[in-house]
Image (spheres, grey):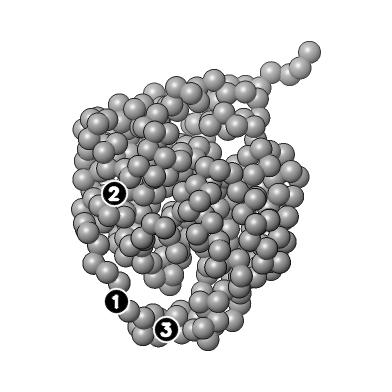
Amino acid sequence: MKTRTLVISIVLLVPVILAACTPGSPAAVFQDQPPAAATALAPNSTPGGQAMPSSKDAINVVKAYMDTANTGDFDKTLAFYADDAVVYNPLGVFVGKDEISQWLTDDVKTTRVTPTDVQLKGPMVVVTGTVSLDRFQKAGIGDVAFTADYMVANGKIRFFSPIVQLTSDQQTKMKAAQAKAPAAPTPAANPEDVSRSYVDAANSGNFDQAIAFYADDAAALVMNNTLLLSGKDQIAGWLKNDVQSTRATPQDWQVNGNVVTNTGTVSLARFTQLGIKQVQYQAVYVVENGKIRFFWPTVMLTPDQQAIVQAAQPTPTSAP
């Protein structure tokens, strides 16, 4: 079993991820063009070449997953995940079914979810509701509100990222519980330094330098949450194109444990061709042992920029 150095404060992580990747926020693609394997898209497909599930099918998979997980049956719950699935939660990044099983073994025993709303928003099934978590119960906290993003392809879950939303009282109790916990180990490398150096390498256009920042078992969710990359080889296929023309100008850095959030502006060829020189972005980096384990960038367009992009889209043709 791989030893994890990831230690995250749930209280501080929640607003960071919510701000970065709120479903339905005005966001565009954080890259100039997709990797070669994703340039020719079939109708109703994702940039990864997978069939987009219908709203009903994707929602049914997620509902069945939650129902199964609530029974505590580990084998049936794990079976919902694709072999190359990625889970990103406040406990860590888990890439591939084997790593997911390590997290799920204990989590499925005590976690019980009560969904209140399930919707398909773009490529994600977004669930809101309340959840009972053992680590919160031990801190004297009852049920907590949550939002969870699921990506479903071919009847399997490929991506799952739950976010808890603590009230002020719950945050106070959680902080008190965390103060009694053992001190987090000092990271092998400063996560912010790693993230900053990665941006510098990517901005230089040097592919070899940029890809070297990723762990072999890293994951990335790019192209407006539609392309999930599992493993360094898949990331390389995307990055070879991305480093050629994408140039980021970082403006702010926030660090919480080994999670780094960076905001700023970025120049993308696909937007400059439309007269849009810079767009706002926010990126989340999870750094483990000096390497990027997970990268989740989001680009946010202003209403005027959205209108320009929308006007440039091809006009759908009517069937004869």
**Amino acid type, label 1:** Ala
Q: Are marks 3 and 2 in contact (CB under 8 Å)?
A: no
Q: Nearer the viewer, mark 3 or mark 2?
A: 2
Measured in 3D between alpha carbons, the distance from the residue under mark 3 to the one under mark 2, in whole angstroms, is 30 Å
Categorize mark 3 by other alpha carbons within 10 Å: few (<14), some (14-19), many (20+). some
Residue underneath mark 2: 291
Q: Residue at x 54, y 20 (%)?
A: 40
Q: Residue at x 48, y 31 (%)?
A: 308
Note whether residue 275 is visible.
Answer: no
Q: Nearest the camera: 80 or 178?
A: 80
Residue underneath mark 3: 177
Measured in 3D between alpha carbons, the distance from the residue under mark 1 to the one under mark 3, in whole angstroms, is 12 Å
Q: Position of residue 11 (x, y in %)?
A: 43, 72
Considering every residue shown, the one lying at the far right of the view is 320
Q: Nearest the camera: 26 or 254?
A: 254
When asked about the image quadrant of residue 302, the answer is top left
> Position of 161 compared to 188: left or right?
right
Categorize mark 1 by other alpha carbons within 10 Å: few (<14), some (14-19), many (20+). few
Residue underneath mark 1: 183
Q: Quadrant for the C terminus, please.
A: top right
Q: Are marks 2 and 1 in contact (CB under 8 Å)?
A: no
Q: Nearest the camera: 210 or 116?
A: 210
Q: Position of residue 142 (x, y in %)?
A: 59, 81
When asked about the image quadrant of residue 191, the answer is bottom left
Q: Quadrant for the N terminus, please.
A: bottom left
**What secondary structure is marked by label 3?**
helix
